Image (cartoon, helix red, strand yellow):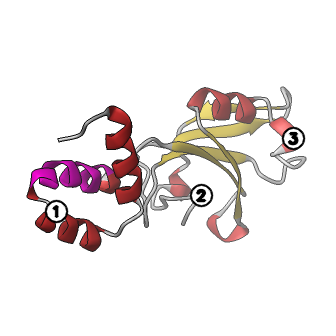
Amino acid sequence: MFSSKSEMRRLEHQLKSKSDEELKKFAERNPQLETFVEEIIAERSKVDLTPIFTITTIRHSLDAGSRAVGYAHKFENADRWVRENALNINECGYYPFCVIEPVVQGIYCHPRKEHWYKFNQKKDEYEPCDKPDRFKQVIGWSLG
């Protein structure tokens, strides 16, 4: 089908810039390349489900407010930043709670897990805690 790998890569590069409709028409005109085209379309439709770990600081009550302060690509980094109160995310006691949520790309992404922290003023750091009862009905702190 292809005389060389470079020829195949060149065609693949050209085809990737086409819309799915254009690719389907191309496959109809070139039935020997139908599988090749289908692989390009399938690869394009894959969704990356690698989460980011959002960090949100929260006031004492729901109506007092919350603030998404950042994210990390690895949970270990987010956890360390929160525990260490990096860059004073507690804002001198203004945000006594913090939650880390793994979030994947999409719309209305609801995290399946939450990692909660409460600020310990004596140690000047956040410590893991259970989700406070007053926040039990809320999910999706960082992206709403």
Instruction: Give the residue at mark 2.
Output: 142
x then y, percent, for residue 114:
49, 43
Instruction: Give the residue at mark 3.
Output: 87
Q: CA distance from mark 1 to mark 2?
A: 43 Å
Which residue shows up at 90% across the image and 47% down it? 92
Question: Is any part of residue 72 visible from this angle?
Answer: yes
- The mark that comes first in sequence, 3 or 1, is 1
The quadrant where residue 61 appears = bottom right
Q: CA distance from mark 2 to mark 3?
A: 18 Å
Which residue shows up at 45% across the image and 61% down it? 137
Question: Is any part of residue 47 visible from this angle?
Answer: no
Specify the quadrant that holds the C terminus.
bottom right
The quadrant where residue 115 appears = top right
Which residue shows up at 28% across the image and 72% down it? 22
Is 68 situated left or right of 89 in this image? left
Specify the quadrant that holds the N terminus.
top left
- The mark that comes first in sequence, 2 or 3, is 3
Main SS of the magenta segment? helix
**Helix, strand or loop at disc 1?**
helix
Work out whether 83 lies above or below 133.
above
**Do callouts 3 and 1 mark residues in contact (Cβ within 8 Å)?**
no
Q: Amino acid at mark 1?
A: Ala
Neighbour tally class for label 2: few under 14, some 14-19, many 20 plus, Cα within 10 Å: many
**Helix, strand or loop at disc 2?**
loop
Which residue shows up at 34% across the image and 58% down it? 15
Choose mark 3 or mark 1, whichever is in front.
1
Instruction: Give the residue at mark 1.
Output: 27
Q: CA distance from mark 3 to mark 1?
A: 55 Å
Q: Nearer the viewer, residue 52 or 47?
A: 47
- The mark that comes first in sequence, 1 or 2, is 1
Task: Based on the picture, tell me whether residue 121 belongs to the magenta stretch.
Answer: no
